């Protein structure tokens, strides 16, 4: 009887089990690469299919797709797309035809028009049927590799990106030669550092890379040069975008008034070449910074190194991945040496048997034998005096192989040549045994030779440096004018008809406003925004401007008059701040702003009081140098408890000792 799964207790349990099965399948069989060979299943099956049909010549990609479908139970479109992605990395697949352009985003031609074959590098490091673990294919008709015996950190060289159910993987590509050097350092237990290297080049700040773990990031910029006055050239673009998408982002920023450009021109072919023409009077350096701030000329990339190992996903840093790959390579080299040693030993064993069989004329002892058993016994008896010379026991299969030697070979047997071949085998055996005794040194030399053979032309393309994030408020083009409609309490760049101009602004600026009640608020500039009736001050707000504010206010309807100097500091947009003690009826009598503390302290005011009984002086001088600069929440210092009539600036020749 066939075992049947137990029925689910409820529909919810059934969907829960099915969801977990599907999530596990997507993670293990589709989206996440394996630690051992750095490949997803579809990539592994493509390479296996290419190896099976490899004869040194190019094969139609359509044919490769068909052969891969013997192992991969998915559609031809997904396989074709995976082949193109592998080919565009220019590491494992040698391509011919139109394979698209990763710079421009142009797609490849149809699979029937393009061809591919394995590269020499792939043949050197990816395949070895003798060391491969084999599984039965999905239909049970063929054998496919569990993982390929890759002797190189392929995952880090190519990079990979995948999205599974509740899990994402993003490993950035690294430089080929740096991976070779890092592998050697790992085998020597020496420190090393790995940073990404992108095929599109560019300039990279990897100070927050965090070894490719979750939470890290790298910032990549286009390489922009100032060719001449009024012209910027983009010769390298950030990884993850295309020249078309980059140009669209620049045009979109220009349409929004964030960047001033005259026109943009794309001359990209084998290398990126975008010309940005500037209008007369535009500053090239400011425009270049604006390109970094408002377009895809600067991108932030977040890595997330996740691999399959021991049948489950695991998050590892790129340094750990490389160390494990280097040790895996050493183990594969050891396995290859052991297999080769066994093959050499078998060859030496039979060559020595053959030499004795022919030179000692043992083959003549079987001439009188009438049965097969007698033939085997005669050969065994003839070999008896020489058995101690052999490193293993002479088996019945060995004796049967001797009977298969042709008379022609016996008649032309060259004893001197046979001795030379045996000595060569002994030398090869001694060499393999030496490599096994010094396995780490052998693996280091193997990596060194690999770098010499395949590292030419794979120099680093992405420049490593550090750069500060561009302050968008400093480089945005101030293409708008800020207007104030004080009567109705509105401000914005779209009320030209009803407002008075305040100054130039950009579409991402913030504006700061002060009301007569002593309230302050910072809001994002808009075409038209309400800021309060009859505001005292409205201006573009710059966080980095160290402005000093001076204010005199009446605390409540009949309270004392207070004065203070303060800075605004950090603010939350759209939050209302009270600069007074908050009593009802509070009114600001004086508000001024200065760029420096010296200018603020130099203020001299005359406070005119309303007449009152027994009041001798109706004018009192007020020097703001008497008040220290405090936070905006400070209450202020007492000026007078009397009623203030007005406040005016003191004349330049005012003498406090002489009176008003």
Image (cartoon, grey):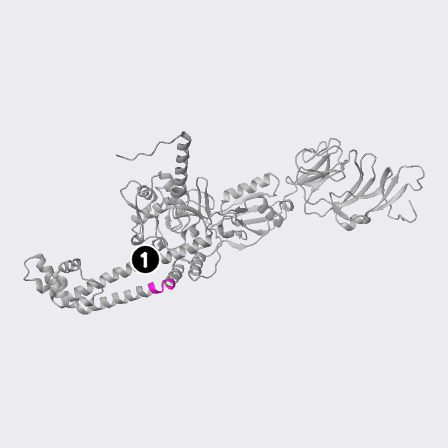
Does the magenta stretch mainly form a helix, a strand or a loop?
Answer: helix
Image quadrant holding the C terminus, namely top right
Indicate left or right for 37 with 527 as reference: left
Percent x, y of residue 287: 61, 47
Asked which secondary structure carries label 1, the reply is helix
* Image position of 535 with respect to 332: above or below: above
- Crowding near pointer 1: few (<14 within 10 Å), some, many (20+)? some
Name the foreground residue: 303 vs 480.
Answer: 303
Q: Magenta span has 263?
A: no
At x 33%, y 39%, the residue is 73
At x 34%, y 54%, the residue is 123
Name the foreground residue: 376 vs 476.
Answer: 376
Percent x, y of residue 164: 43, 41
Which span of residues is magenta-colored?
Answer: 436-441
Percent x, y of residue 282: 63, 46
Image quadrant holding the N terminus, namely top left
Name the foreground residue: 547 vs 636.
Answer: 636
User: Can residue 137 be seen?
Assistant: yes
* Image position of 348 with respect to 45: above or below: below
Please name the residue that numbered disc 1 is placed on. 335
User: Can residue 548 be seen?
Assistant: no
Indicate the quadrant where residue 332 lies. Answer: bottom left
Percent x, y of residue 92: 38, 51
């Amino acid at each position: 009887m066939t075992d049947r799964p137990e029925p689910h207790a409820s529909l919810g349990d059934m969907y829960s089990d099915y969801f977990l099965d599907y999530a596990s399948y997507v993670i293990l069989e589709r989206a996440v690469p394996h630690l051992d060979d750095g490949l997803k299943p579809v990539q592994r099956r493509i390479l296996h299919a290419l190896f099976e049909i490899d004869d040194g010549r190019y094969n139609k990609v359509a044919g490769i797709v068909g052969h891969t479908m013997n192992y991969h139970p998915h559609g031809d479109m997904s396989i074709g797309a995976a082949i193109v992605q592998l080919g565009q990395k220019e590491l494992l697949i040698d391509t011919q035809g139109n394979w698209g352009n990763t710079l421009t985003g142009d797609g490849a031609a149809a699979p029937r028009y393009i061809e591919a074959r394995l590269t020499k590098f792939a043949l050197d490091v990816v395949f070895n049927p003798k060391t491969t673990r084999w599984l039965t294919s999905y239909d049970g008709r063929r054998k496919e590799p569990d993982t390929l015996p890759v002797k190189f950190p392929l995952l880090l060289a190519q990079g990979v990106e995948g999205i599974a159910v509740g899990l994402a993987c993003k490993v950035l590509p690294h430089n080929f030669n740096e991976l070779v050097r890092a592998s050697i350092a790992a085998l020597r237990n020496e420190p090393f550092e790995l940073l990404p290297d992108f095929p599109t080049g560019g300039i990279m700040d990897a100070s927050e890379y965090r070894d490719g773990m979750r939470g890290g990031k790298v910032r990549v910029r286009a390489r922009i040069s100032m060719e001449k006055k009024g012209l910027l050239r983009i010769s390298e673009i950030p990884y993850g975008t295309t020249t078309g998408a980059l140009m669209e982002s620049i045009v979109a920023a220009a349409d929004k008034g964030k960047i001033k450009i005259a026109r943009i021109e794309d001359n990209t072919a084998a290398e990126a070449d975008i010309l940005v023409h500037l209008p007369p009077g535009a500053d090239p350096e400011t425009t270049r910074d604006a390109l970094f701030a408002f377009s895809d000329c600067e991108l932030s990339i977040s890595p997330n190194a996740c691999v399959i190992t021991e049948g489950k996903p695991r998050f590892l840093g790129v340094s750990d991945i490389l160390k494990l790959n280097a040790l895996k390579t050493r183990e594969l080299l050891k396995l290859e040496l052991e297999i080769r040693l066994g093959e050499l030993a078998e060859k030496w064993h039979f060559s020595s048997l053959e030499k004795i069989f022919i030179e000692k004329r043992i083959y003549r002892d079987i001439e009188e034998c009438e049965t097969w058993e007698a033939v085997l016994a005669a050969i065994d008896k003839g070999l008896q005096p020489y058995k101690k010379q052999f490193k293993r026991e002479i088996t019945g299969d060995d004796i049967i192989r001797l009977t298969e030697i042709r008379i022609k070979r016996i008649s032309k047997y060259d004893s001197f040549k046979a001795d030379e071949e045996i000595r060569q085998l002994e030398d090869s055996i001694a060499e393999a045994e030496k490599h096994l005794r010094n396995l780490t040194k052998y693996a280091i030399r193997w990596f060194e030779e690999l770098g010499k053979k395949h590292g030419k032309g794979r120099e680093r393309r992405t420049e490593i440096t550090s750069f500060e994030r561009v302050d968008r408020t400093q480089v945005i083009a101030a293409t708008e004018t800020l207007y104030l409609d004080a009567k109705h309490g509105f401000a914005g760049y779209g009320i030209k008809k009803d407002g008075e101009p305040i100054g130039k602004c950009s579409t991402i600026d913030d504006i700061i406003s002060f009301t007569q009640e002593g309230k302050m608020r910072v809001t994002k500039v808009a075409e038209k925004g309400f800021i309060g009736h009859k505001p005292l001050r409205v201006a573009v707000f710059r966080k980095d401007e160290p402005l000093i504010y001076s204010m005199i206010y009446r605390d409540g309807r009949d309270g004392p008059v207070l004065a203070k100097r303060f800075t605004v500091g950090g603010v939350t947009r759209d939050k209302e701040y009270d600069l007074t003690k908050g009593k009802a009826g509070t009114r600001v009598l004086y508000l001024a702003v200065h760029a420096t503390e010296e200018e603020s302290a130099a203020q001299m005011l005359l406070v005119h009081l309303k007449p009152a009984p027994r009041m001798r002086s109706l004018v009192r001088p007020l020097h703001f140098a008497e008040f220290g600069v405090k936070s905006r929440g400070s209450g202020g210092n007492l000026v007078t408890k009397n009623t203030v009539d007005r406040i005016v600036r003191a004349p330049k020749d005012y003498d406090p000792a002489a009176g008003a």
